[in-house]
Amino acid sequence: MSTLNKSSMEVLNDVGLCQEKGEALSKKNCPHCYSKKVKIHSHYQTKGNGERKMFICQKCRRYFAETHGTVIAGLETPLSEIIKVLKARMEGMGLNADVRTFGYSKKTILN
Ligand SMILES: [Zn+2]
């Protein structure tokens, strides 16, 4: 299978950046107490990535976001842009070429 046909999550898994490998984002454990008894509490809008889910843990009653514990948590760069850069990196594009092509700083890409 070519990398270009893969979904965003598969790309993240491939490059080893997704900490919850093979697990759908909807099947989360509580990041605070690791309970599996979590349910969707609400939805919220992000600046660049559309809607995301907010979860509440039924055991410790704490809230956490769908991206909690993943590298994309707290990122302001749209996910589609990140995927584009990651794909380019996987296709063998060097970091310097990435910087030239996408206009992000090295720090942004490495983070
Ligand atoms: Zn909890």
Image (cartoon, helix red, strand yellow):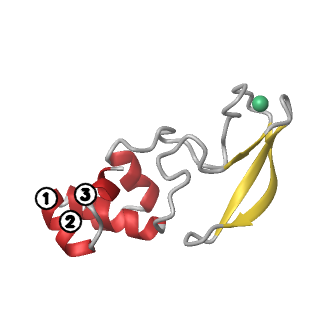
Question: Mark 3 packing: few (<14 Cα in 10 Å), some, or many (20+)?
Answer: few
| Residue 56 in view in this figure | yes
Which amino acid is tagged 1? Gly
Task: Report the side of 9 relative to 62 (left or right).
Answer: left
| Residue at mark 1: C-beta within 8 A of ligand 1 | no
Could you tell me which secondary element the residue under label 1 belongs to? loop
Could you tell me which secondary element the residue under label 3 belongs to? helix
Question: Mark 2 packing: few (<14 Cα in 10 Å), some, or many (20+)?
Answer: some
Picture coordinates of residue 105 (x, y %)?
28, 63
| Residue 93 in view in this figure | no
Q: Are marks 2 and 1 in contact (CB under 8 Å)?
A: yes
Which amino acid is tagged 2? Asp
Q: Are marks 3 and 1 in contact (CB under 8 Å)?
A: no
Q: CA distance from mark 2 to mark 1?
A: 6 Å
Residue lying at 86% horizontally and 35% vertically, measured from the top left: 61
Residue labelled with disc 3: 106
Residue labelled with disc 1: 94
Q: Are marks 3 and 2 in contact (CB under 8 Å)?
A: no
Picture coordinates of residue 51 (x, y %)?
67, 68
Above-or-below relation of 86 to 26? below
Which amino acid is tagged 3? Lys
What mark, if any, has residue 98 been given in the picture? 2
